[in-house]
Amino acid sequence: MQEWFADFKADFQLNFIDDGRWRWIVQGLGNTLKITLFSLLIGIALGIMVAAVRSTYDKNKEAMSKHKGAGYHLFTVVNAICKLYLTVIRGTPVVVQLLIMYFIIFATSRNDVMIAVIAFGINSGAYVAEILRGGIMSIDNGQFEAGRSLGFNYVQTMIYIIIPQVFKSVLPTLCNEFIVLLKETSIAGYVGIVDLTKAGDLIRGRTFSAFMPLIAVALIYLVLVVVLSALVGKLERRLRKSER
Amino acid sequence: MKKILALTLAVLMVVTMMVSFSACKKEEKLVMATNAAFPPYEYKDGENFAGIDVEIAQKIAEKLGMELEIVDVEFGAALLGVAEGKYDMGMAGITVTEDRKKTMDFSNTYATGIQVIIVKDGSSITSLDDIFEFNADGDPVALKNPDIKVGVQQDTTGDIYSSDAVENWGLNDLNEDGSIATDRVVRYKTGAEAIAALKSDKVNCVIIDNEPAKSFVAANDGIHILEGDNEYAVEDYAICVKKGNTELLEKINKALDELKADGTIAAIIEKYIPSKAN
C-alpha cells in the first residue's frame, strides 16, 4: 500500500509538477470552456432563429398559401435554406466540419479558437433548432387557438403562451445538447488547439504515462458536466413551481 | 435426423477448435507500432505498409523467426504503447532522447535523421538568421519575430525541440518552473496537416525530419526546405522496446548488427533515399 502510494506520488509529480506541466491542463481547460461557452451562445442564437422560421412556416403554410403574396415566396426560400442548413450540418461529422472550417473556409485566419467557436456554434445551432422546433410543435394546437381567440396575434401568442411552455419542456433535452457540445470540443486538438484533451495528450507524449493525464482529464470533464447538470436541474425545479 | 444434426455439429465444433488452436501455435508475432504517415520511413502504399522502417522490421522479424504485425497509430500513441508493453517494439523514425530513455529501452541506431525547416516560397525566412538573433558565440538569444508560429507533428522531436526556450534553440518563452509562457508551436496530428497549415499561412514554418520533409516538398507546390547550413538538429533513429525487455532488445540488436554487416540496411535505405539526394 505504501509502495503504491509512493508510486502514485512519483507519477503525479512527473505528470503535473515537473516542468510545470499542470499549466497545460489549466490552459486546456480555459480553451475548452471558452470554446464551449461561445459556441453555446452562437448555437442558441442560430437555433432560435432557425426554429422560429421552420415552425412558423409549418404552422402558417396553409393560411399563407391562400394569398401567395411576396411574403409567402420569401418565406418558402428562407425555410428551404434553413432545411438545407439542417441537412448539411446534421449529415456530416463535426470533425470534418471543423477541418473544413480550419483548412478551407478560414484558411487564412490565425485565430484558431475563434474558428473552433464558429464551427461548433454552427454545428450546435442545427441540433438546438430541431430541439426547439420539436418543443413548439408538441404544444397542443388548442393553446394557439385559445391565444388567437383572446385577441393575440401569432407573435403575441408565441411569446406569451407558447414559448414559456416550450422552454420548460425542452430544458432537459437542451441540457443534453450542451453536455454533448462540451465533450465534443475535445476534437479541437485536431487543428492544433490546446484544449483539455489535447493538454492531456501533450503531457502523455512527454511523460509516456497514460494513467495520470487521462484520468485527470476525464475527472475534469466529469466535474464540468456534473456542475452543468446541477445548474440546469436547479433551473428546472424553479420553473416547476408555477405548476402548483 | 436430430442425432445426425447433433453429430455434425459436434464434429464441426471439434474441427474449428483444432484449426483455431493450430493457428495460435503457428508463429509467434512481433507487433510493431508505427505512424504510417512519415515517408519514406513508413507510409501506406495502397493497402500495404512500405518504407525503410517497415522493410528493416520485416528483415528483423525473419531473423527472429517471428511473424511481423504492424499497427498504425498516432506517433505519441506508438511511443506510449511500447512504454506500456502494448506493442513489442516501436519503429517510426523514433529519435533517441534522454527523456524517452527513462521509460523505454532503445536498440542500436540504424539511421540518422536531420530536423529541417520548411517554408513557403517567397517567405521572409531564408535561413536560421531570420528566425533567431544570435550572440557572439553563435547561440540564439532572442527571436527576430516574436509573432512567429511554427507547425510540428505532435510529440515528435520537432515538437519537443521547438517547444523549448529560445536559449535552447526552441521558439518559446518559458516560465521559471519550465512550463511554457508563450507558446508559438502549433501541434498537428500528422506532418501532412502541418504542411497544409503552412500552405494556408497558419504557421510561418514547419520543423520536421529531413526525409519526410523531402517527400512533402515533392508532393506540394510552393514550399521548400531551407537549404545550406540550416539544419535544425541532427539525431539518431532507433527501435524502442518496453523498458526492461532486454531479451527482445538483444535479439533485435543482434539482428540489426547482422543486417548492417551484410549491407541489407544500406541497400534498403539506398532504395528509398538514393545517395544522389543525400
Image (tube, grey):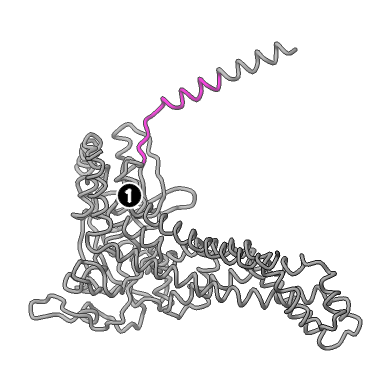
Judge left or right: residue B251 versus residue B54.
left
Where, quadrant-wise, is the N terminus of chain B in this rendering? top right
Quadrant assignment, res B245:
top left
Q: Main secondary structure of the magenta part?
A: helix
> Is A183 in the magenta?
no
Res B177 visible: yes
Residue A27 rendering spot, x and y as whole percentages:
35, 69
Judge left or right: residue B267 versus residue A52.
left
At numbered mark 1, what does the secondary structure look like: helix, strand or loop?
helix
Name the kind of residue labelled 1 in the image. Leu
Residue B141 rendering spot, x and y as whole percentages:
15, 78
> Is B17 in the magenta?
yes
Q: Residue at x 82, y 83 (%)?
A: A152
Chain label for disc 1 = B
B110 versus B210 height, above or below:
above
B40 versus B185 height, above or below:
above
Res B255 visible: no
A212 and B99: which one is in front? A212
Q: Residue at x 42, y 79 (%)?
A: A110
Label 1 environment density (alpha carbons within 10 Å; few <14, some 14–19, many ≥20): many
A40 and B168: which one is in front? A40
Outermost bottom residue: A70
Where, quadrant-wise, is the C terminus of chain B in this rendering? bottom left
Task: Look at mark 1 in the image and give the residue it sits on.
Answer: B80
B15 and B101: which one is in front? B101
Residue A107 rendering spot, x and y as whole percentages:
47, 77
Residue B235 rendering spot, x and y as whole percentages:
21, 59
Q: Which residues are magenta?
A: B15-31
B199 versus A93 height, above or below:
below
B117 versus B113 height, above or below:
below
A242 and B145: which one is in front? A242
Judge left or right: residue A89 versus residue A222.
right
